[in-house]
C-alpha cells in the first residue's frame, strides 16, 4: 500500500495548509473506490505522516455515508506551530487544553507551550 508522505511534503511546500480532495487521497493510498474503510484509512494515514485535517466529518464514515471523490478537506502540518495548536485545540478539544493553547497564542505567553514546542522555538532563535 502507498502512503501520504508526498501529501505531507506538498503541504509543507504550501506553508503547512492546503486543500485536497478524497479522490486524490484515495488514489495516493492505492484504493480504487471510496468507502467507510477507505475514509478511515485516509484519516489514519494523514495522522501517521503528521498531518491534521478538517472538516472532521468528511473522513468520518458515520457522518459521510456517501463519500465522493471531489469532496474537499483541508490538510495541515501538525508541527506544534501556532496554526496547528489552534486547529488542534478547536478540532479536538477533548485532547487539548483549549484555554491554555488559545490564551497563550493570543497573549504571546510561551508558558502554555509544550516542552517540545518550546524547544523548537529556542532552535528557531539559535538558527536565526
Image: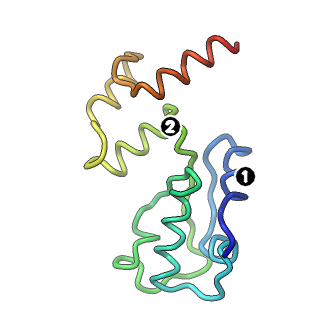
Identify the image quadrant of residue 127.
top right
The structure residue drawn at horizontal position 49% and vertical position 40%, both measured from the top left corner, is 84
Residue 9, position as x, y percentages in the image:
72, 50
Q: Which mark is residue 83?
A: 2
The figure's colour scheme reads rainbow
Q: Which numbered disc, 1 or 2, marks the residue that appears first in the sequence? A: 1
Q: Secondary structure at mark 2?
A: helix
- Front-most of 104 and 19? 104
Using the image as rendered, state which of residue 71 and residue 13 is in the foreground.
13
Quadrant housing the C terminus: top right
The 10 Å Cα crowd at callout 1, few under 14, some 14 to 19, many 20 or more, is some
Q: Is residue 54 above or below residue 117?
A: below
State whether residue 88 is above or below residue 70. Answer: above
Instruction: Tell whether label 2 touches label 1 (CB within 8 Å).
Output: no
Number of the label disc, if any, that sits on residue 10: 1
| In front of the other: 92 or 74 | 92
| Residue, far front | 1
Dot 2 alpha-carbon crowd within 10 angstroms: few under 14, some 14 to 19, many 20 or more: some
Residue found at x 64% / y 83%: 31
Q: Residue at x 61, y 79 (%)?
A: 69
Q: Residue at x 60, y 88 (%)?
A: 33
Q: Is residue 126 left or right of residue 76?
A: right
Tell me where residue 6 appears, x and y as whole percent.
73, 58
* Callout 1: SS: helix
Q: CA distance from mark 1 to mark 2?
A: 17 Å
What's the mark number on residue 106? Answer: none
The spot of residue 60 in percent (x, y) is 40, 72
Amino acid at each position: 500500500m502507498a502512503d501520504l508522505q508526498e501529501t505531507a511534503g506538498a503541504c509543507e511546500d504550501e506553508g503547512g495548509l492546503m486543500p485536497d480532495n478524497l479522490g486524490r487521497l484515495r488514489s495516493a493510498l492505492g484504493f480504487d473506490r471510496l468507502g467507510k474503510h477507505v475514509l478511515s484509512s485516509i484519516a489514519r494515514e494523514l495522522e501517521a505522516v503528521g498531518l491534521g485535517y478538517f472538516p472532521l466529518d468528511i473522513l468520518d464514515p458515520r457522518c459521510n455515508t456517501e463519500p465522493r471523490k471531489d469532496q474537499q478537506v483541508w490538510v495541515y502540518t501538525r508541527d506544534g506551530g501556532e496554526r496547528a495548536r489552534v486547529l488542534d485545540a478547536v478540532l479536538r478539544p477533548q485532547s487539548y487544553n483549549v484555554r491554555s493553547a488559545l490564551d497563550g497564542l493570543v497573549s504571546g505567553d510561551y508558558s502554555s507551550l509544550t516542552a517540545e514546542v518550546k524547544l523548537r522555538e529556542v532552535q528557531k532563535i539559535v538558527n536565526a
